[in-house]
Image (spheres, grey):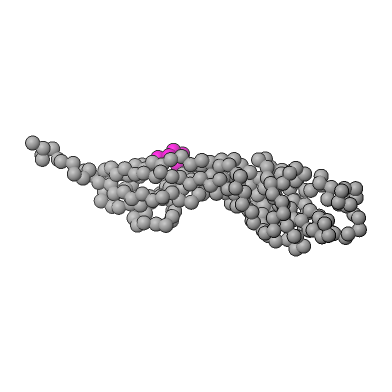
Amino acid sequence: MAVAGCGGAGANEDTGSGDDGGGDDGGGGGTGLSAPAMPSGLEATPQDGTVQLGWDAVDGADTYNVYRSTSSGVDVSSSALDTGIDQTSYTDDTAENGTEYFYVVTAVASEDGESAESDASGEAEAIPFAAPSGLEGTSRDSEVALSWDGAAGADTYNVYRSTSSTDGAEGEPLATGVAETSYADTDAQNGTKYYYRVTSVNSSGAESDASSEVEKTPFSDPPNRPNSTDRP
């Protein structure tokens, strides 16, 4: 999760929000409307194909505008991603997995048809990515071989193992930083039932929700396979 700093990244100096006295809004025309303070506490949480934004409420703000860029130094003189947001959260559902996004938020005060926009908040960064799917396991002698489908936007994977069924990725991972879409648990003990889940990790180190669970028991001899002495 990226947390915004305190500085105003890309202050709104180019929008002409009442300082030049000559815009269509009649800037400085005697309404006495002041721009609210810049929002603070901006956080961005990456998910599968979305980024969840949240920030602290600003006194005197009626709505908020969200700006997005694929490079640091978001330009708030360009078009906003969305405007007129009347709450302190926003879901960017146009984000693409694996793409790095930078966000800032501004506060807007409105009165008698006039509006004043604050400077921009500090930036928050996020890279959306998917959780793994298609997890499968193969039982072997003192080993369980796992494989799964590659997740869009994932940089590496974490593998979790438990001896009881879990609701998600619980406890410390069995393995981290797995670069491939497969993993061999060579520490498994024959006759022990194991439950596995896998998570994605993006390039910023954020971890996804867990995959579905797979249960496997390693064994020394495959069941129902006749021994050589049993064969005619």
Residue 68: percent from left, percent from top? 68, 45
Q: Residue furthest left?
A: 232
Closer-to-camera residue (115/227): 115
Residue at position x 77%, y 52% from top? Answer: 119
- Counting from the top left corner in percent of width and height, residue 99 is at 59, 40
> Quadrant location of the C terminus?
top left
Residue 88 placement (x, y as % from top left): 67, 58
Left or right of 101 in this view: 61? right
Q: Is residue 188 visible?
A: yes
- Residue 67's x, y, as percent? 70, 47
**Residue 40 visible in the picture:** no
Judge from the rendering whether residue 171 lies leftward or rightward of residue 127; answer left or right.
left
Q: Name the one closer to the observer, 228 or 54.
A: 54
- Residue at x 77%, y 44% (from the top left corner): 77
Quick one: which residue is furthest to the front in this view?
113
Q: Quadrant of residue 136?
A: top left
**What secondary structure is the stretch in magenta mostly built from?**
loop
**127 to the left or right of 161:** right
In the image, which residues are magenta? 178-182
Most extreme residue toward the bottom is 59
Q: Residue at x 40, y 40 (%)?
A: 182
The foreground one among 212 and 200 is: 212
Residue shown at 35% from the left, 57% from the top: 164
- Give the answer, above or below, for where 158 lies relative to 85: above
In this view, 39 is above or below 177:
below
Q: Is 179 a magenta residue?
A: yes
Magenta stretch: residue 167 in it?
A: no
